[in-house]
Structures are given as C-alpha cells and as structure tokens.
Image: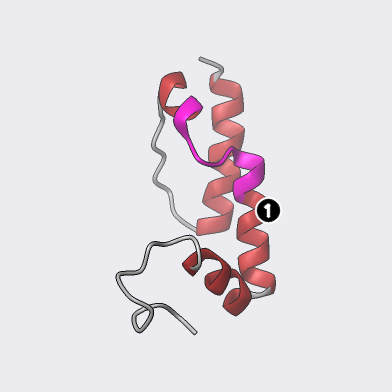
Amino acid sequence: MNHGANVQYHQETRLMTGTEQIFLVTQAWKRRAWMDPDAYRKAYQRSLRDPEGFCAEQAMRLDWPNSRSAPP
C-alpha cells in the first residue's frame, strides 16, 4: 500500500471537509470505488460552483418510486 499517496489524499480531503477523520481502505475497496480522488475533487468543485445544478444532476441518477417524488 502506498501510504504516501494516501496521506496526501487524506490531507486534501481534510482541507475540503474540515474534518480530522481518516478512513484507510484496502486496494480491493479502492478498485470498486465509484470515484477516484481526482473525480471526487472535480465533483466537489462542481458542487460548490453550481449547487442546484449539481444536486439536480445527481438526483437524476437515483431511481425514484414515481414521478411525483422525483425532483422537478
């Protein structure tokens, strides 16, 4: 495991979230992740630039039980 890369990623994550919690994961878990650190940073920055657009975009990825419960 490359702890140097993990430390850098977690330091950057701590700066973005303001928290001190670090959760190390195995390589197998990382391979199954939906986002790598770069994709996470891009999504996070997008959420800051356009929170409503970002949330609407993410809501479209969910399976809603019926059209009335889906966001506009």
Q: Please give the name of the residue rendered at 35% of the width and 84% of the height, measured from the top-left corner.
A: 68
The residue that appears at 59% across and 75% down in the rendered structure is: 51
Q: Is residue 22 magenta?
A: no
Three-letter code for the amino acid on which mark 1 is drawn: Lys
Relative to 48, say whether 72 is above or below.
Answer: below
Instruction: Identify the residue at horizontal 55%, vertical 47% (top origin).
Output: 13
Task: Work out whether residue 23 or residue 41 is closer to the camera in this orientation and state it.
Answer: 41
Q: Which residue is mark 1?
A: 42
From the top left corner, tell me how far across and down residue 59 is, in percent: 47, 68
SS of the residue under disc 1: helix
In the displayed structure, would residue 45 be above or below residue 52?
Answer: above
Where 49 sits versus 26, above or below?
Answer: below
Q: Position of residue 66 (x, y in %)?
A: 32, 75
Prevailing secondary structure class for the magenta stretch in the rendered image: helix
Q: Which residues are magenta?
A: 31-40
Q: Residue 6: x and y, percent?
A: 54, 29
Residue drawn 60% across and 23% down? 4
Q: Is residue 3 above or below residue 48?
A: above
Q: Residue furthest left?
A: 65
Between 49 and 57, the one nearer to me in the picture? 57
In percent of width and height, residue 26 lies at: 41, 22
